[in-house]
Image (cartoon, grey):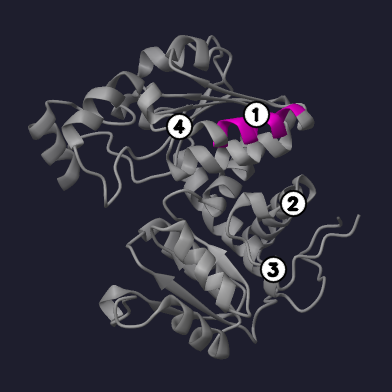
Amino acid sequence: MSIDLRGRSVLSLDDLTADEIHYLLRLAGTLKEERQSGTELKQLSTRNVVLLCEQDSIHTRAAFEVAAYDQGANVTLIGPSAGHTRYRESIKDTARFLDRLYDAIGYIGRSQSVVEEVAKWACVPVLNGGTDTSHPTQTLADLVTMQECSEKPLDGMIVAFLGDGRSNVARSLAVASSKLGIDLRIVSPPSFWPEASFIENVTSAARDSGGRIAVLEHVGTGILGADFICTAPWFGDTDVRWAERVRQLAPFAVRENVMEATDNPQTKLMHSLPAWHCREDEAGARIAKRFGVECMEVCDGVFESKSSIVFDQAENRMHAAKALLVATLADRRGPSEPPA
């Protein structure tokens, strides 16, 4: 079956079928190989891309910028520091202005409703670089990394997510897993579980794909046999009641005993970054002093261990962003695009 995503927006992995996700993973892998071998062709040399940033994200911004530049596209960054704010102009007007100048809009912000509003009024592809409930680029990068680091097919993998089960990373991973047949366990305190309707939707989809989605409280049960343990930052810019969050999430930090308890010597650690794993950064030092903890989502020993593939994962966010840009913006099928 031919896959054609040209002109499409990707606001969530709900927007993509399983075949389309597999297509993007193959494309990301091909583009990565071409970049490493020096044979990459610039398929977006006539394109202009704008990144509309309503919050800072060094990882997502860098991924999209390098991906676009590699493919020959021009990139403009518009954020609060550049004078953009929705309080001075409606999202509707901003979207209708930007689509007159640009061939695609990348959005990095907080509210899923905002990126959906941009896509409603823009006539060009809108790509979600991360909102409060959805992070499709990160999850595509995670899947690319899993394929690179395991001999198993995706539908044979066991993945455990530890931490805030309501996070955009956990939710997007659940959506992808439900479509691709992955055995995913979200392990978190019940107060951090996704809403019941979301759990029902992904578990139902997983049954259709041959996968399994479980939302659990017991760490030992959730991680047993896991090929990958994933986690994500416990805090966002808008989070409050830090002390209470630390208290509830502390038992779900990834430490050496957690990695050992998987009973799988090949278990790999994944983290979407930034990771508060030690006191070396300013935030880590402040958190350690305030809450009396040495780490948050993952301890330094695991983060720096041979089991950690977090920087392979971080690099792959760029290749995933590039696959999205090429798939939605390239004029025609080229040598970089794998067969469907």
Place residue 122 in its image quadrant. Answer: bottom right
Q: Observer-nearest residue: 230 or 218?
A: 218
Looking at the image, residue 204 sits to the left or right of residue 131; the answer is right
Image spot of residue 236 (x, y percent): 30, 47
Image spot of residue 219 (x, y percent): 43, 14
Earlier in the chain: of badge 4 and badge 2, it is 2
- Closest to the camera, between mark 2 and mark 1, is 1
Residue at x 56% of width, y 13% of height? 264
Looking at the image, residue 166 sits to the left or right of residue 249; the answer is right
Disc 2, disc 1: CB below 8 Å? no
Q: Any mark on residue 26, and which? A: 2
Which residue carries the number 4 mark?
A: 308
Disc 1, disc 3: CB below 8 Å? no
Amino acid residing under circle 2? Arg
User: What's the magenta region?
Assistant: 198-207
- Closest to the camera, between mark 4 and mark 3, is 3
Earlier in the chain: of badge 4 and badge 3, it is 3
Q: Any mark on residue 64, and which? A: none
Disc 3: CA contacts within 10 A as few (<14), some (14-19) or many (>=20):
many
Amino acid residing under circle 1? Thr
Q: For mark 2, give the secondary structure.
A: helix
Q: Any mark on residue 203, and which? A: 1
Q: Observer-nearest residue: 82 or 301?
A: 82
Residue at x 70% of width, y 53% of height? 16
Image spot of residue 71 (x, y percent): 62, 74
Q: Observer-nearest residue: 74 or 117?
A: 117
Q: Judge whether 214 appears above or below 78 on screen.
A: above
Disc 4, disc 2: CB below 8 Å? no
Residue at x 74% of width, y 71% of height? 6
Earlier in the chain: of badge 2 and badge 3, it is 3
